[in-house]
């Protein structure tokens, strides 16, 4: 085996993870069809107002947000501190426009450093271990909710987190993402409370995570963990327009959540909740993906008002509540639903009408996965109603209520409503909606002229911005074409879409930024399917490094807001012996990978130093990585900070062998190899079937170095011996250690070497990355 990453041992076999439009009522009750042209955004996007007749928020005085703001009350913000100041600046009630430029990490201190759950808990007396001991059902029982010292401490810690991540939006305000900057808020909650006339547009809203969910043993038959924050929460709010935003749990999917007391330790609440007598709300052209409890309309069955319009939204990878409607008059038209499971999110139902809710569902389109039935799209408590017409499933007209009501003896949904929609701008037939909305819904779509992403004159480093869109609406159709045209310091801005291609950023393109335009990595996917043993057109095979979907050889590059995947599967190619299939080949110095997803099976991410003893450092932050064999590997210095790692299930029985997380081959002369810190590792695999790592030893100087610290480990990890030999080289001769890990896969003992506290102080992200030039990308 040579020192270059071209051929490595193969892991065990992996188990492989129309009709025309109709305007005829489909048995859901008669509703008039009113068609209006699509609204076009004004030239000055930030001063835009809700068009006439565009849903319930157009009622009465309409919704103008901060359109009347004078120059002194137009703010451009790029940090949490700037956002806080903009929300409170000036006299109360004064109209304001807040332009969000780039992605803001909401959960940060005043210096911009992201805060951890431990930071929020400091000084409160809260400890998860103590909380679990105090309220274990075997000790506390299941008849009452937690109370006492640890519950008080949990509430105090939760309040400290809320003080950092909850932002109250006042009346007469527009919060809007600056086009072309990947604008958004991650880890933050926008709350509109008892305020009138608010606009929220063109933002990526991701990973609103509660560090301190509450255990409630009385919630259901087995209890539940309940979290506190929604990405956007409307409470007693009126005249609100929520437009062209993307909502997602990325990069922390629910599959990363551990199980405690037999229930998922749920850290996400709603994406968009409309409660507490909120009224006159229009939600249009948004993307909702990979989330469980997506949208709640009504805080209880006795809530009031709740006149809400949802139109031209995309729901994919959604478990439930799209929406759940309590009371109210709810109009759903021209929305696109896809029930295909995604990132572990499996569909339960789409629309729930209960407590007397009056829902009209018109011209919506469902793509039905093979495991779901039309009868499973709706649910209710027997008091709610759903009327409508023109709905399609797989392109064919359907009677949604009839399908539900005839499927079983459960509670029937009523089919008549006591109101009739008239505010229906843009109502159109359902045929063709999925393709149309793929290009029109979600954050990053709007420009100052209301169209799709367009070239901008300069990038953040002073270079140009080169735009990419698969549909031909930008300067380049492929990512590689833009990279080829770029020079050092440029930005390649990639519009929403799936790009089937390999990408190579050579060393000459130093300082390049590759950026997803929406800020949501799930929206921008670069995909290919080569393996090490795949035959090349000119003869030979690709080898491990050559199999990469994306190769980044330049120094000082940044990759943000994209997904890079290698979809090659062993089961589809039984004749191929060399099954390494790299998603990302990172082989430069001072490289940053932020808010992105890297997905494969064997050898997902290669951290490579072309000169084994040279300085090559790569920093991964707030990313998602998935694989099964050696899928974080190489001889570079790499830090995985606050990432989510999924150990994929290859079907091994309990106690068997599913795979290995890491395979470093750090040169013996280098003190630092791979560090995984403050992260979450999860797995659907059976307990005790995964190794944390093994030492890749291609030559005598390769003595792998790996530390995993302050990280949650799943039950899939072999607790008695998570390290193993490779190629006859003992793991005990490598440099493997753990420190302060938690979760069911954590442990100590002779086969689990732990860092002493004084040594742990030398194994931090800062220490690994400083090098000879004091590089510090962690702030």
Image: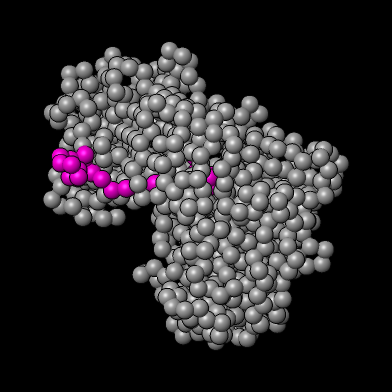
Residue plotted at (39% across, 41% down) = 480
Q: Is residue 535 above or below residue 669?
A: below
Residue plotted at (38% across, 33% down) = 505
**Percent x, y of residue 661:** 30, 38
Q: Considering the whole magenta stretch, tell me its main secondary structure.
A: loop
Q: Is residue 102 visible?
A: yes
Q: Nearer the viewer, residue 63 or 513?
A: 513
Classify the position of the N terminus by image quarter. top left
Q: Which residues, given as a range, are shown in magenta?
A: 515-542
Residue plotted at (27% across, 20% down) = 612
- The magenta stretch spans residue 565: no
In the rendered view, does 87 fall on the left or right side of 154? right
**Percent x, y of residue 771:** 42, 16
In the rendered view, does 368 fall on the left or right side of 306? left
Q: Nearer the viewer, residue 191 or 620?
A: 620
Q: How is the image coloured?
A: one colour
Classify the position of the C terminus by image quarter. top right
Q: Nearer the viewer, residue 403 or 211?
A: 403
- The magenta stretch spans residue 527: yes
Q: Residue furthest right?
A: 91
**Percent x, y of residue 262:** 42, 54
Q: Nearer the viewer, residue 631 or 60?
A: 60
Q: Is residue 52 above or below residue 397?
A: above
The image shows a total of numbered marks equal to 0
Q: Is residue 357 above or below residue 463?
A: below
In the rendered view, does 515 fall on the left or right side of 311? left
Residue plotted at (82% across, 49% down) = 68
In the rendered view, does 12 fall on the left or right side of 740? left
Q: Is residue 205 visible?
A: no
């Amino acid at each position: 085996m040579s020192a270059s990453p071209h051929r490595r041992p193969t892991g065990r076999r992996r188990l492989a993870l129309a009709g025309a439009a109709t305007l005829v009522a489909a048995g859901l009750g008669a509703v008039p069809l009113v068609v209006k042209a699509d609204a076009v955004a004004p030239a000055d996007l930030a001063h835009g107002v809700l068009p006439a007749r565009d849903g319930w928020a157009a009622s009465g005085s309409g919704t103008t947000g901060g359109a009347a703001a004078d120059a002194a009350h137009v703010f451009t913000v790029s940090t949490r501190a700037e956002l806080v100041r903009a929300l409170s600046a000036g006299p109360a009630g004064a109209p304001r426009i807040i332009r969000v430029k780039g992605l803001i990490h909401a959960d940060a201190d005043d210096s911009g450093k992201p805060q951890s759950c431990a930071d929020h808990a400091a000084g409160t007396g809260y400890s998860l271990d103590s909380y679990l001991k105090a309220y274990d059902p075997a000790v506390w029982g299941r008849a009452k909710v937690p109370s006492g010292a640890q519950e008080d401490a949990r509430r105090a810690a939760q309040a400290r987190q809320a003080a950092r991540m909850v932002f109250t939006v006042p009346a007469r305000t527009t919060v809007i993402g600056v086009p072309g900057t990947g604008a958004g808020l991650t880890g933050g909650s926008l709350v509109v409370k008892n305020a009138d006339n608010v606009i929220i547009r063109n933002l990526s809203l991701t990973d609103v995570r509660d560090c301190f969910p509450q255990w409630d043993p009385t919630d259901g038959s087995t209890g539940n963990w309940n979290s506190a924050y929604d990405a956007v929460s409307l409470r007693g709010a009126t005249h609100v327009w929520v437009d062209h935003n993307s909502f997602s749990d990325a990069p922390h999917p629910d599959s990363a959540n551990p199980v405690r007391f037999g229930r998922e330790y749920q850290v996400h609440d709603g994406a968009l909740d409309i409660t507490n007598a909120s009224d006159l709300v229009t939600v249009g052209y948004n993307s909702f993906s990979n989330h469980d409890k997506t949208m709640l309309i009504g805080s209880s069955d006795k809530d009031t008002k709740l006149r809400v319009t949802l139109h031209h939204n995309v729901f994919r990878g959604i478990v439930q509540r799209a929406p759940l409607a309590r009371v109210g008059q709810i109009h759903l038209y021209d929305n696109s639903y896809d029930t295909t499971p995604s990132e572990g999110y499996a569909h339960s139902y789409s629309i729930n009408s209960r407590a007397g809710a009056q829902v009209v569902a018109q011209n919506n389109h469902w793509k039905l996965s093979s495991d779901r039935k039309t009868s499973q799209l709706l649910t209710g408590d027997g008091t709610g109603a759903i009327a409508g017409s023109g709905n399609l499933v797989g392109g064919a007209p359907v009677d949604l209520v009839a399908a539900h009501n005839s499927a079983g003896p459960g509670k029937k949904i009523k089919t008549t409503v006591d109101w009739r929609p008239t505010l229906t701008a843009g109502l159109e037939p359902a045929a063709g909606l999925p393709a149309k909305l793929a290009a029109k819904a979600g954050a990053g779509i709007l420009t100052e002229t209301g169209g799709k992403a367009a070239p901008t004159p300069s990038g953040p480093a002073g270079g140009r911005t080169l735009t990419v869109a698969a549909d031909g609406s930008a300067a380049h159709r492929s990512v590689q074409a833009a990279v080829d045209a770029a020079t050092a310091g440029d930005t390649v801005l990639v519009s929403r879409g799936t790009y089937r291609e390999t990408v190579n950023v050579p060393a000459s393109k130093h300082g390049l930024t590759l950026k997803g335009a929406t800020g949501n990595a799930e929206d921008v996917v670069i995909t290919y399917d080569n393996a090490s043993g795949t035959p090349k057109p000119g003869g030979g095979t690709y080898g491990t490094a050559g199999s990469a979907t994306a190769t980044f050889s330049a120094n000082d590059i940044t990759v943000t807001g994209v997904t890079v995947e290698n979809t090659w599967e062993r089961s589809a190619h039984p004749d191929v012996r060399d099954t390494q299939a790299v998603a990302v080949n990172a082989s430069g110095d001072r490289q940053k990978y932020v808010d992105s997803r890297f997905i494969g099976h064997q050898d997902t991410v290669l951290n490579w130093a072309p000169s084994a003893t040279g300085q090559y450092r790569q920093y991964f932050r707030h990313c998602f990585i998935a694989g099964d064999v050696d899928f974080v590997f190489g001889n570079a210095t790499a830090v995985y900070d606050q990432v989510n790692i999924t150990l994929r299930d290859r079907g091994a029985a309990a106690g068997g062998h599913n795979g290995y997380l890491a395979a470093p081959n750090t040169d013996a002369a280098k003190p630092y190899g791979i560090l995984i810190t403050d992260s979450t590792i999860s797995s659907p695999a059976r307990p005790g079937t995964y190794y944390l790592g093994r030492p890749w030893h291609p030559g005598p100087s390769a003595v792998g170095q790996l530390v995993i610290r302050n990280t949650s480990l799943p039950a899939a990890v072999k607790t008695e011996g998570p390290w193993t030999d490779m190629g006859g080289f003992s793991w005990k001769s490598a440099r493997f250690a753990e420190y302060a890990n938690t979760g069911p896969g954590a442990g100590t003992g002779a086969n689990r070497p732990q860092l002493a506290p004084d040594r742990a102080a030398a194994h931090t992200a800062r220490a690994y990355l400083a090098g000879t030039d004091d590089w510090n990308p962690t702030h």
